[in-house]
């Protein structure tokens, strides 16, 4: 296990919309989403955002790490998206723990943790399978923890009328 993994604090949240600005401030609408709507005729979810917030102590400032988030089922297997064999939903990137810069504010160096937000906004939705619980899992340097996950539900189409 890497030192960055050992010292990281990671949290995930779903929202209707989210964006992080250049200063690291997070703007979110509809945060805390647990059910992602779905257009059953098109087979696509409604628009939503996944926000992964990462905090690191000064001991790992300037260290690089591999960040990844994967969409899984409740058994921990990557989920195949439903639209034409679209594959699995996985996002990965090499990042660096940037030391916060609060010049001119009187904050001493290394007094506050490094904090960043990775925002994945799916403005046209995703072809998510309906009728079950899905899980987003974040990892650092190929390792994850049980609390670095976020479960959500995608409803199935409503049952048709019963005749007879």
Image (cartoon, helix red, strand yellow):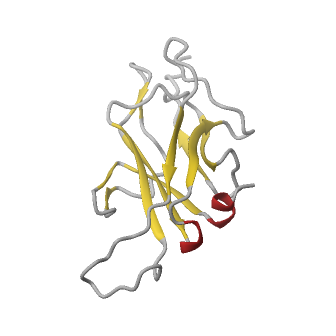
Up/down of 68 relative to 56, above or below: above
Q: Position of residue 155 (x, y in %)?
A: 52, 36
Q: Residue at x 31, y 64 (%)?
A: 25
Residue closest to the eye, 153 or 86: 86
Up/down of 59 relative to 31, above or below: below
- Outermost residue on the top side: it is 84
Q: Position of residue 79 (x, y in %)?
A: 62, 29
Where's the C terminus, which quadrant? top right
Q: Residue at x 70, y 41 (%)?
A: 74
Where's the N terminus, which quadrant? bottom right
Q: Residue at x 72, y 39 (%)?
A: 76
Up/down of 149 relative to 92, above or below: below
Q: Quadrant of residue 40?
A: top left
Residue closest to the eye, 16 or 109: 109
Residue closest to the eye, 25 or 122: 25
Residue closest to the eye, 72 or 133: 72
- Give the tally of numbered discs: 0
Q: Position of residue 159 (x, y in %)?
A: 53, 27
- Outermost residue on the left side: it is 104
Q: Residue at x 58, y 66 (%)?
A: 60
Q: Position of residue 92 (x, y in %)?
A: 53, 38
């Amino acid at each position: 296990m890497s030192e960055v993994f050992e010292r990281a604090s990671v949290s995930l949240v779903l929202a209707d919309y989210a964006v992080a600005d250049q200063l690291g401030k997070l703007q979110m609408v509809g945060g805390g989403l647990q059910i992602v709507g779905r257009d059953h005729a098109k087979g696509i979810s409604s628009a939503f955002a996944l926000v992964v917030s990462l905090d690191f102590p000064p001991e790992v400032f300037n260290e690089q790490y591999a960040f990844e988030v994967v969409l899984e089922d409740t058994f921990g297997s990557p989920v195949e998206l439903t639209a034409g064999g679209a594959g699995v939903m996985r996002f990965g990137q090499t990042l660096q723990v940037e030391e916060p810069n609060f010049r001119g504010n009187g904050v001493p160096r290394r007094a506050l943790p490094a904090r960043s937000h990775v925002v994945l906004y799916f403005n046209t939705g995703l072809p998510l399978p309906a009728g079950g619980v899905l899980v987003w899992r974040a990892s650092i340097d190929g390792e994850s923890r049980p609390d670095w996950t976020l479960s959500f539900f995608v409803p199935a189409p409503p049952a048709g009328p019963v005749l007879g």
